[in-house]
Image: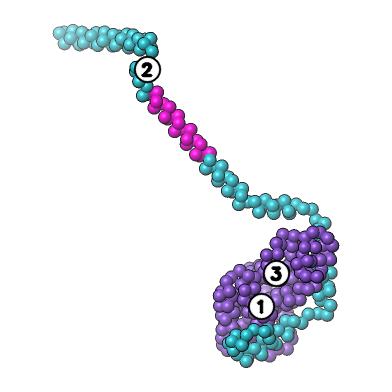
C-alpha cells in the first residue's frame, strides 16, 4: 500500500490508527536519525520525534498531498527541531551557571563514550553550524536527498540549499582544523 | 556516506569524511527495541490527547481567524467614517442651499411679512437714534 493510499484511508476515517501506524513504521527511523544528528542527545531527539508524530496525527486530515508525504513529514520535523533548539537556547541562557555546574558533575552522554579527538571536534563543529545549514547538510550528505526536496523542506530555493550545503562543508573543515 | 555526486564528495576532505562516518555510526545507535517502545508511547499520548475536551480547538479556531477579525474591524471603521463624513457633507450642502434660495421662488405673503417686521424694527431703531441725538444736543447747550 502506498503512502498516498494510507493517507486517504486515514483521511476517510477508515482504520485511522492502522493507517497511521503503517506510515509511522515506514518513516520513523529516517526522521528520528535526522533529528538526532541535529540535536545529538538521544533524549532530546526522542522528545522532538514524539512532538513531530503527534503533529502529524493532528494535521494529517488537512494534508492535501500536494507534495510527497516524506517531504511534508521532514518539514514538520525541521520546524519542530528548530523550535526545540531555540527554546533550549533560551533556557540555557537563563540558567547558564546551573548548566555549567551540572556539566562539571554529570558529563554529557556522548562524552562518556570514548571518542577520538577528531570526533569530538566534529561534534563541536556541527554544533556551531547555523541550524539551517546543519539540517541541509545532514539531509544531503547522509540521506542523499535531492536539492529540490531539501529546498521544499527548509523553505528555501534550490540555490539557497546548495549554498547552505557548501557553507556547512567549508565551516566544518575550518572548524576541524582550527579547533 | 550518502549517494551524493563526486563533485560534492571532492569538496569534503578525507579527514572530514572519516569523522562524519564515525558521527553517523554513533548517531544511528539506539537502545534495543527503542522504536517499538516509541510507537507504544506515541499511541498512548495520542489516545490521551483524543480524550481531552476540545476547548483547545475553539481557541485555535479564533486564533486562526484573528487576522480576519482585525480586517473586518478595520473595514467597519473605514465604512463608518466614510458614511459619517458623507452625511455631514450632505447636511452642509442642504444648509448652503437654504442660503441660496432665489427670492423669486418665495411666496408674496412671506416677503410681505418679512418687510413689515423689518419696517417695524427699522422704525424703532430710527426713533431711538433721534432721541439719543436730541439728548446729546441739549447736554451741549447746557
Mark on residue B105?
Answer: 2
- Chain under callout 3: A
- The colour assigned to chain A within the rendered structure: purple
- The colour assigned to chain B within the rendered structure: cyan
Q: Is residue A17 visible?
A: yes
In front: B130, or B98?
B98
In front: A78, or A88?
A78
- Chain under callout 2: B
Task: Tell me what residue is drawn at x 61 percent, y 82 percent.
Answer: A125
Q: Is residue B12 visible?
A: no
User: Residue A35 at x, y = what percent?
Assistant: 70, 75
Task: Tell me what residue is drawn at x 74 percent, y 71 percent.
Answer: A49
Mark on residue A68?
Answer: 3
Disc 2 residue crowd, few under 14, some 14–19, many 20+, Cα 10 Å: few
Answer with the quarter of the image where residue B23 lies: bottom right
Name the chief secondary structure element in magenta: helix
Mark on residue B24?
Answer: none
Disc 1 residue crowd, few under 14, some 14–19, many 20+, Cα 10 Å: some
Magenta segment boundaries in residue numbering? B80-99
Amino acid at each position: 500500500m502506498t503512502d498516498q493510499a494510507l493517507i486517504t484511508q486515514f483521511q476517510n476515517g477508515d482504520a485511522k490508527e492502522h493507517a497511521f501506524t503503517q506510515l509511522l513504521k515506514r518513516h520513523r527511523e529516517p526522521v528520528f536519525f535526522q533529528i538526532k544528528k541535529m540535536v545529538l542527545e538521544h533524549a532530546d531527539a526522542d522528545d522532538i520525534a514524539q512532538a513531530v508524530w503527534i503533529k502529524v496525527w493532528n494535521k494529517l486530515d488537512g494534508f492535501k498531498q500536494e507534495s510527497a508525504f516524506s517531504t511534508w513529514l521532514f518539514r514538520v520535523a525541521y520546524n519542530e527541531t528548530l523550535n526545540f533548539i531555540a527554546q533550549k537556547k533560551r533556557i540555557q541562557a537563563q540558567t547558564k551557571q546551573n548548566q555549567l555546574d551540572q556539566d562539571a558533575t554529570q558529563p554529557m552522554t556522548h562524552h562518556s563514550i570514548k571518542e577520538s579527538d577528531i570526533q569530538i571536534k566534529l561534534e563541536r563543529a556541527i554544533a556551531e553550524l547555523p541550524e539551517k545549514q546543519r539540517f541541509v547538510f545532514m539531509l544531503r550528505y547522509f540521506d542523499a536527498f535531492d536539492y529540490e526536496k531539501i529546498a521544499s523542506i527548509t523553505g528555501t530555493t534550490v540555490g539557497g540549499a546548495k549554498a547552505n550545503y557548501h557553507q556547512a562543508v567549508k565551516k566544518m573543515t575550518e572548524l576541524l582544523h582550527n579547533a | 556516506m550518502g549517494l551524493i555526486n563526486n563533485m560534492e564528495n571532492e569538496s569534503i576532505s578525507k579527514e572530514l569524511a572519516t569523522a562524519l562516518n564515525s558521527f553517523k555510526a554513533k548517531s544511528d545507535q539506539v537502545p534495543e527495541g527503542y522504536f517499538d517502545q516509541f510507537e507504544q508511547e506515541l499511541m498512548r499520548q495520542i489516545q490521551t490527547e483524543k480524550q481531552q475536551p476540545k476547548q483547545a480547538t475553539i481557541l485555535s479556531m479564533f486564533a486562526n481567524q484573528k487576522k480576519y477579525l482585525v480586517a473586518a474591524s478595520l473595514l467597519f471603521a473605514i465604512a463608518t467614517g466614510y458614511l459619517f463624513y458623507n452625511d455631514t457633507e450632505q447636511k452642509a450642502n442642504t444648509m448652503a442651499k437654504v442660503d441660496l434660495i432665489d427670492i423669486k421662488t418665495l411666496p408674496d405673503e412671506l416677503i410681505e411679512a418679512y418687510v413689515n417686521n423689518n419696517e417695524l424694527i427699522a422704525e424703532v431703531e430710527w426713533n431711538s437714534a433721534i432721541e439719543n441725538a436730541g439728548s446729546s444736543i441739549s447736554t451741549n447747550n447746557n
